[in-house]
Amino acid sequence: MSQFARLAGEIAEINEGPVFGVPGSGATLSLIDELERKGRDFVLAQFEGAAAMMAGTVGRLSGKAGLCLSIKGPGVTNMMPGLAVASFEAFPLVAISEAYGAGTPAARAHKRIDQSALTSTVSKGITQWTKASSGFAEVAALAQAETPGPVVLELAQPEPAQPAPLPQLPASKPGHPRAVLDLVRKSSRPLVIAGTLAIRQGLSRRLAALAIPVFSTAAAKGVMDETQPMSAGVFTGVGLELSPEQHLIKDADLVVCFGMRPNEMLATRPFGPPAVNIAAVSEPGAEAFAFAAVAGADSAGEVLDELAGKDWGADLVAKAQDGIRRAMLSNHFLPAHVFEAAQAHFAGTVRGVFDTGYFCTIAEHAWRPRDAALCLMSGQGRYMGTGIPMALGAAIHDQSVPTVAFLGDGGIGPFVGEARLAVERKLPLLFCLLSDGYLSSIRTRALNDKLTQKPVTIGQPSWARVFEAFGMPAANVDSEDAFARALGAWRPKDGPAFIEVAFDPDPYEAMVKGIR
């Protein structure tokens, strides 16, 4: 059995998801051939970084490491943005690349680069596939272990005698729940903030059953059904007077966090009331939250049992949610109207994927998913350009619900070439450009400080003809009624479409005031 047949067999045993990438004429093509013999789907991307984002998204939705591949040197270099996104967002991912073996003479410099040094800042580790290596399962396990992220697996030629060892799987944080449980028992007005760990731990139903305010981080949005009355929405740490977090935190006497990590918050600082955290592993920087007590993930059930006996805040949650909704929908046609219309049209059974920008700030509060699989965004990295690859990865992985990719003027361009996949595969995917003609979050600073707006002005903001050229129907709208008509004309089973929504730039730029 060849090394590629063995690797393909082990991959097929781990998960059934597609493989994304841009192959070369060497080891990667041989591996793809073996994977296809085993019935695995290969998705040819335009750019390796987008392939890694698509694969990481599959990892996020499936819970099993997504898989992408590339050639050595420039291929791995191109893959770096996708590895960074997987690292920021805690997406489990195995990135397979071709590589020179350790014994290759220095004179063989074609496409050569120190791939270990290159990827070290955005991966959990790197190793080589050899006859002596322990197997793909170990690589995937490291990618999936807390906190999930990308691992690089090299197909080195010539094969090294001794592959570089992978880092050890992190030890689980020891459970010492007594101090946490004591604080929970004594509290009368606790509130919850759930991070992405709560998704991976399968805590959604338990959280939805609580009768206390439950927030999530932006990255964990949907971990609790947000149509439920005790869903308080997103907690960022920097919410202003209109945000529910500002209204509720001052009335709480304890903050109970599930998997609070520094990069899941926009501000890492004490919450005001005492706080406790349920964590799987120690996170550098978590001391800035000044937790009164911390316990391991194995104590989550006991903590939720204690919280189940608490009951407060329903009226405050309703008032806070009503206040921010009224503010987002007042006076002008803005993204909040689009988000509400999309969810109403599909009766909530629709996946929203959000690139980053001011419209994403609004989506954190206006999009109310019933499940974490129905909301995807770069909640930790705020990485512009992720919307199209994430939406494609999600739609390829799961076509049972329609997917809408909400994109801004800045985020639509970096990976627009990948949109061809939606047409090729007839995906139930709608691309929705929310355009005001500016990089609005940066324009705010230009306006406030009376600086030039030229660098943040989009000279030709329309992309409709580009998407039409891909073979999609396209519509331009500038009102809520027009958007509803365009949305009603889309038939997901017929494949992808494009809607371009134009907004008045000044109300658009001002729409986050009082929110963040």
Image (spheres, rainbow, N blue to C red):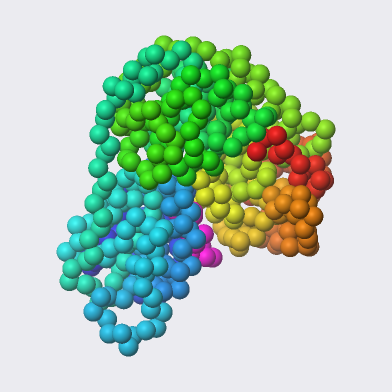
Residues rendered magenta in the picture: 45-55
Is residue 233 positioned above or below 218 on the image? above
Is residue 29 positioned above or below 64 on the image? below
Instruction: Give how far across and how far down residue 508 sits, in percent.
Output: 77, 44
Foreground residue, 47 or 489?
A: 47
Is residue 147 positioned above or below 203 on the image? below
Instruction: Give how far across and how far down residue 501 sits, in percent.
Output: 76, 47
Q: Is residue 48 magenta?
A: yes
Drawn side of residue 26 relative to residue 382, left or right: left
The quadrant in which residue 359 appears is top right
Looking at the figure, which quarter contains the C terminus?
top right
| Residue at the image point whose x is 45% and y is 69% from the top | 77
Drawn side of residue 113 relative to residue 241, left or right: left
The quadrant in which residue 26 appears is bottom left
Asked if residue 19 can be seen in this view, the reply is yes
| Residue at the image point whose x is 46% and y is 21% from the top | 254
